[in-house]
Image (spheres, helix red, strand yellow):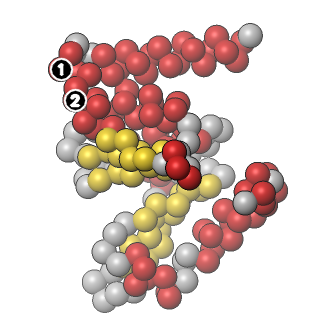
Amino acid sequence: MALLKNGAFKEEFAHFLMEEWKKPPYGPIIDRKTVYISHGGKCMEMENSEDEMLQTLEPSRLQGQHKEADTLIAFHGKNITTGNILARSTDTDVLIILLGLVGSMEGLSIMMDYGSGNQWRYIYVSEIAAILEEKHSGLTEALLGLHAIKVVILHSA
């Protein structure tokens, strides 16, 4: 796993996956799901057509230049209109951002796949947000604002 700590390897590996997963043999793995792969400002949407042919699209609504992975995950989450979202990250900033956005993502169930090894778990973001909103309306949006202030303070120090 040392390779995954190497920036150049991660760049090439992400590029390889984006190219490799376009190939038809991966259609049965994707099945009836829609898979989004994002890297370097480019985002692909992959799904099987009715005749089981793998379709790869690059919708303009999903293209963006985000420097940080946490805001990129939120950007893509906001563009999903139905179904379930599973965000994979070990960054607590992603959790805070998703909690802040969950109110504007009506009808979606959002989960976070967090941690690694023995510390791995699912976090039910939508349920946490609902509990926080029951306690105090607007609390999840306030978390998003607090996070933004924290980032500004840390980066200016």
Residue type pointed to by label 1: Glu
Q: Give me the C-alpha separation between circle 2 and circle 1.
A: 6 Å
Q: Position of residue 25 (x, y in %)?
A: 50, 88
Residue at 25% from the left image edge and 53% from the top image edge: 82
- Locate residue 70: give its quadrant: top right
Above or below, comparing residue 56 to residue 62 in the picture: below
Above or below, comparing residue 28 to residue 121 in the picture: below
Q: Are marks 2 and 1 in contact (CB under 8 Å)?
A: yes
Q: Position of residue 90 (x, y in %)?
A: 55, 42
SS class, disc 1:
helix
Residue nearer the viewer, 72 or 150 = 150
Residue type pointed to by label 2: Ala
Tag 2 residue = 130
Residue nearer the viewer, 134 or 75 = 134
Taking the image as shown, residue 122 lies to the left or right of residue 103, namely right
- Locate residue 132: give its quadrant: top left
Tag 1 residue = 134
Q: How many marks?
A: 2
